Amino acid sequence: MKIEYYIVLSLALFCIGIVGVLTRRNAIIIFMCIELMLNAVNLLLVAFSKMHHLAGAAANPTAGIEGQLFVFFIMVVAAAEVCVGLAIIVMMYRNVHSVDVNFLNRLKH
Amino acid sequence: MKNILQLVWLVPVLPLIGFLINGLFRKQLPKSLVSLVGCGTLLASFVVSVLLFLQVKDGHTGVISFFDFISVGDFSIPFAFQVDQLSSLFLLVITGVGFLIHVYSAAYMHSEEPPHFARYFAYLNLFVFSMLLLVLGANYVIMFIGWEGVGLCSYLLIGYWFKNVEYTNAAKKAFIMNRIGDLAFLLAIFWIIAKLGTVTYTNDAGTGVLDIISGGLAKANLSTFEITGITLLLFVGATGKSAQIPLYTWLPDAMAGPTPVSALIHAATMVTAGIYMIARSNIMYTLAPVTQTVVAVIGLATAVLAATIALKQNDIKKVLAYSTVSQLGYMFLGLGVGAYTGAVFHVMTHAFFKALLFLGAGSVIHAMHHEQDIRNMGGLRKKLPITHMTFLLGCIAIAGIPPFAGFFSKDEILAAAFGRNMIYWIVGVITAGMTAFYMFRLYATTFLGQFRGTEEQRHHLHESPAAMTIPLMVLAVLSVIGGWIGIPEVLMHNAHSLEHFLSPIFAESAKIAEGHHLDHSTEYVLMGVSVAIALVAIFVAISRYSRKPEMKEATGFGKVLANKWYVDELYNFIIIRPLNWTGRFLNSFIEKNVVDGIVNGVGRFVNYTSRQVRLVQSGQVGSYVLLMVLGMLLFFAIQFFVKK
């Protein structure tokens, strides 16, 4: 398949993620949208990695492997982020019985 | 023999030590010790000056160098003193007359509070120190240090009674007017440095300023135009210190200081600085005929103008002050016509009789309880016999009656002026007549006739203490015999010892200038005319003012004279008022609107923008995230469009 398809799909996922983060008020949904953006990036990394592998496999059997490595890193970071983020959201719910992020503007006062 | 010349540093340092002791311990020292330190240091430096003079008289002159004052690349200004005929003569006058004035001050100022009394003596010593530095310096920069020093001290002393606003204004006036002249002097020094690369007067290698100039213009790369410019600038400096047109109005105002200070400024220090400077640079002036004419004309104009003003003044000190301005004009006339010896001679004799007159006036003021208006005096002859006698001798000396001191010096200048231009002589003689007239008007109104003061003043009239009358007597003797060192050739063969003494200083000038030798009969006629005019003026003044003084306010032309030709008002109108107006405009418009506008505008702008930017900090998570995304986009855009 052509690389452009992957790019367009990834772009679409990323934009959905951004719009979700910007517009939604539910902290969990915002979280999911962030995951969506991360996955859009992962998809792109994998696609480019495959493309490079196909192009350079004759000279270098491990061509393009760096992209897939980065995917693993991102997944690890995302998992860590989920741990911390979910903990924050849980604490937030315990305190205010809501996961509405607009509620957090009281931190300003 | 050279050893005594090495001691020259003692001459200025002793008064400096006196200044330090009296200045630093003014609260601890009792009055008696203060006056002892003040007078003693000066007496010691007078003794050293006499020793130096005796050396110089035997022909031992020299430049004594102490250390490098300024050294930049291959240009250096040494801190050095020049001991020669001219400077040693000035040393004698400054320390000698200065010492008498110090002694007099000890009695005159005795009613002052102890710390102020010590402050006064500290200033006096500093004044003498500065003047000695000015005279001794072996180059123009050291002279300039002393030049500034006397300016500062005149400010301090004129404003000595600093609680009186009028007096401090007079002090400021003196200071500012002097600064105008100082600027011109400074420019002249820079010009000399730029052209000649040195400021030393003379040295053995022949590379000093005066050596180069006397060695010929071509060698010095100085055109006549440049030398004229330099000498004119130096002269402007001299008009500031020596109170010539247009910078003379500070000197009469300087009467605000204590009377001995006036005597010091007018006789021994300060005002003679300009004469000294031109006499020192005589070769430059001889080579700049245009400047010489300017000097002579300004000097003569000042002499006449000040003499006319003195005719109508009623303050005893103001008359003397204008008389000083007028006599200084004579000295400049002498310098302008090339009679350098005559000018220096007149400085010396004038120092004697003007110090005498001022101290005599101080004695009168002391007796009259600070009354200075001569219309309220009269008939003091019997009450103050010593003051009266010495004052009379001073008046005769300044009027130019032979064989008193003033006659010889004034006659020498007038004879030289006649040789240069007859008009100089005519105006000079008329001025001499006016001098005699106003001096005897002052004398007759003060000492003759009936007493016109209050009963209380009459009751308190008393002769001054010995510390005041002894300096008066010494100065009176000097005023009588001081002129005998310069008896002209026509009266006695080979008797002008001052001219022989000073001839090495003016030798180069004398070589260049063609001699104006008057024949003896002409000289007798000139002397006869000036003495006759003086005698007539004295006779008229005494007969007119001894019985009936001039009590009513002057009218018509006399009023113009009494108001000093309205020169102060003119300066006020053309200089001070526009300056004040500009100041007010800058204050009210530029300062309020432009400067404050900028400063406050910056403040208001920061205030406004911060209030606007604060709105962004809403606490809304959504808006933060939006800003973050926008920032990211901006970052990408910059990365994308701005390639490295």
Image (tube, coloured by chain):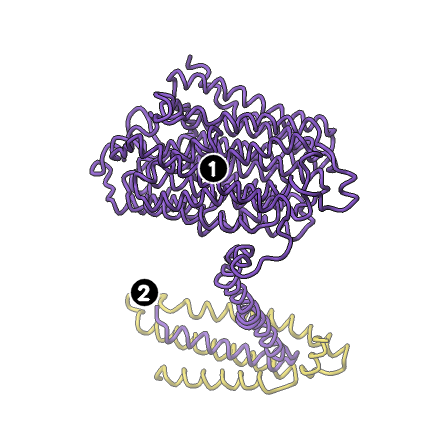
The x, y position of residue A67, in whole percent, is 42, 70
A52 or B342, which lies in front?
Answer: B342
The residue tagged 1 is B272
Badge 2 element:
loop
Residue B234 seen from this side: yes
Up-down: is B424 above or below B396? Answer: below
Q: Amino acid at mark 1?
A: Thr
Judging depth in this view, the residue of A96 and B241 nearest the camera is B241
Pointer 2: residues within 10 angstroms few (<14), some, or many (20+)?
few
Q: Where does residue B594 sit, x and y in percent of width and height?
A: 52, 71
Work out whether residue B455 or residue B307 is closer to the camera in this orientation and state it: B455
- Nearest to viewer (mark 1 / mark 2): 1
Residue underneath mark 2: A60
Residue at (56, 79) in percent of width and height: A34
Do the residues bearing badges 1 and 2 touch, measured as CB atoms within 8 Å? no
Quarter of the image that includes the N terminus of chain B: top left
Q: Nearer the viewer, residue B34 or B343?
A: B343
Confirm whether circles 1 and 2 share one chain: no
Relative to B157, is B219 on the left or the right? left
* Colour yellow, chain: A
Q: Chain of mark 2?
A: A
Who's the residue at 34% across and 43% down the image? B231
Q: Quadrant of residue A35?
A: bottom right
Residue positioned most to the top: B1
Task: Kindly indicate the quadrant of the structure image that contains residue B469.
Answer: top right
Question: For this view, does B275 lie left or right of residue B464?
Answer: left
State the SS at label 1.
helix
Q: Is residue B440 above or below residue B58?
A: below
Q: Amino acid at mark 2?
A: Asn
Which chain is drawn using purple? B
Q: Chain of mark 1?
A: B
